[in-house]
Amino acid sequence: MFLSAAPDNKIPIGILDRSVKLTNEPPSGLKANMNRAWIFLGPKNFEEKDPKLKSIIFALCYFHSCLIERQRFGKLGWNMIYPFSLGDLRDSSSVLHKQFERLQSGTVPWIDLRYIFSEIMYGGHIVNPYDRILCCAYAE
């Protein structure tokens, strides 16, 4: 039987308290986070893509993994706990693909991509100015 921990008036609290609880936590370590991010984006879909796009996706996975891994260090990592998730990575990848579809010249708009990823996609969670500076430094 599967139960959700989401509040529901139909399930008594006593059953939830006695139940086995499973969570999906990010793995420990940068390499494990990179592997999880890369598998999540589905590298099979990128085999026929432009090499520039592949390298940017790899860098995006690395950026995501660094931000997730830094959370393990508590107050030494971030001033607050931010809800970075694979959804941020998925949305950033989607924005990246749309940017590449509109790309007319051969040059990659690095400044635009860095701003979108560090200030909007991931930076949208960040409220502390020092954490925002750190996130932008990682993106750069």
Image: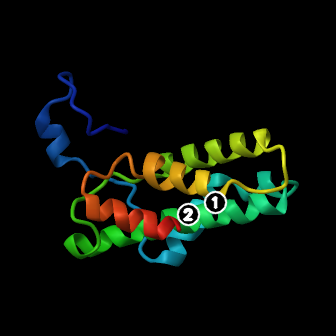
| Left or right relative to 109: residue 128 | left
The colour scheme is rainbow
Q: Position of residue 130 (x, y in %)?
A: 27, 65
The quadrant where residue 28 appears: bottom left
| Left or right relative to 11: residue 30 | right
Q: Position of residue 45 (x, y in %)?
A: 78, 51
Tell me which residue sits at (73%, 58%) in the image: 43
Q: Is residue 95 above or below residue 59?
A: above
What is the tally of numbered marks visible in this picture?
Answer: 2
| Left or right relative to 7: residue 27 | right
User: Would you name the residue on which mark 1 appears?
Assistant: 39
Q: Quadrant of the N terminus?
A: top left
Q: Amino acid at mark 2?
A: Arg
Q: What is the crowding at mark 2: few (fewer than 14 residues within 10 Å), some, or many (at least 20)?
A: some
Tell me which residue sits at (58%, 63%) in the image: 61
Q: Nearer the viewer, residue 113 or 57?
A: 113
Q: Nearer the viewer, residue 16 or 97?
A: 97
Q: Position of residue 7 (x, y in %)?
A: 21, 31
Q: Residue furthest right?
A: 48
Q: Is residue 70 above or below residue 18?
A: below
Q: Which mark is residue 36?
A: 2
Tell me which residue sits at (75%, 46%) in the image: 100
Q: Is residue 105 above or below residue 132?
A: above
Q: What is the crowding at mark 1: few (fewer than 14 residues within 10 Å), some, or many (at least 20)?
A: few
Q: Amino acid at mark 1?
A: Ile
Marks 2,1: beta carbons within 8 A: yes
Q: CA distance from mark 2 to mark 1?
A: 5 Å
Q: Nearer the viewer, residue 19 or 39?
A: 39
Dot 2 falls on a residue whose secondary structure is helix
Dot 1 falls on a residue whose secondary structure is helix
Q: Position of residue 10 (x, y in %)?
A: 20, 22
